[in-house]
Image: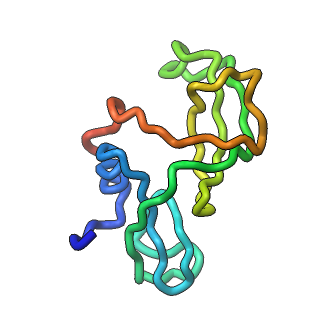
């Protein structure tokens, strides 16, 4: 990338706003993790670099939500799942574009972003 970016959730979402799924990769143990942190959760190294992740992976598990928190009630029912990316990183998220009855553990899904709802600032 050339430029140094901080390993913060704010920077992670800036990348998401640009349509990039980025993770932090440890230079010591090779672990890749999302969300980013200032040190590796596996070996505590600070030797980190940003890496762009592949946006495809396999569905590990899912559930269909019928009773949702207030801010998500207008979406019910909706599917929530965990995908394991081709890079090995696991991400939770709302599954869209697939009928609930067609969801299968092991199926290939693609990560897409709703960039309209990315927070502009954090507490």
- In which image quadrant can residue 110 be found? top right
Position in image of residue 87 (x %, y %)? 58, 62
The answer, for residue 123, to whether it is visible in the render is no
Q: Is residue 9 left or right of residue 29?
A: left
- In which image quadrant can residue 69 be found? top right
Position in image of residue 38 (x %, y %)? 40, 71
Q: Is residue 102 above or below residue 16?
A: above
Q: Residue at x 59, y 44 (%)?
A: 92
The residue at the far left in this view is 3
Query: Considering the image in quadrants, where does the N terminus appear?
Result: bottom left
- Colour approach in the figure: rainbow
Q: Is residue 41 left or right of residue 64?
A: left
Position in image of residue 14 (x %, y %)? 29, 50
Q: Is residue 5 above or below residue 48?
A: above
Q: Residue at x 35, y 35 (%)?
A: 115
Q: Residue at x 41, y 81 (%)?
A: 46
Q: Is residue 59 above or below residue 52?
A: above
Viewer-nearest residue: 95 or 57: 57
The answer, for residue 28, to whether it is visible in the render is yes
The residue at the far top in this view is 74
Q: Residue at x 57, y 39 (%)?
A: 93
Count of marks, rendered view: 0
Position in image of residue 43 (x %, y %)? 56, 82
Q: Is residue 101 left or right of residue 4?
A: right
């Amino acid at each position: 990338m050339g430029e140094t970016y901080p390993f913060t959730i704010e920077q992670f979402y800036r990348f998401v706003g640009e349509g990039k799924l980025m993770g932090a990769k440890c230079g010591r143990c090779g672990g890749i993790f999302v969300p980013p942190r200032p040190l590796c959760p596996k070996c505590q190294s600070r030797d980190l670099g940003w890496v762009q992740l592949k946006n495809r992976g396999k569905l590990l598990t899912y559930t269909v939500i019928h009773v949702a928190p207030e801010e998500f009630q207008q979406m019910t029912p909706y599917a929530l799942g965990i995908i394991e990316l081709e890079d090995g990183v696991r991400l939770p998220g709302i599954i869209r574009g697939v009928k609930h009855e067609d969801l299968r553990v092991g199926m290939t899904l693609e990560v897409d972003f709703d960039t309209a709802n990315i927070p502009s600032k954090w507490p």
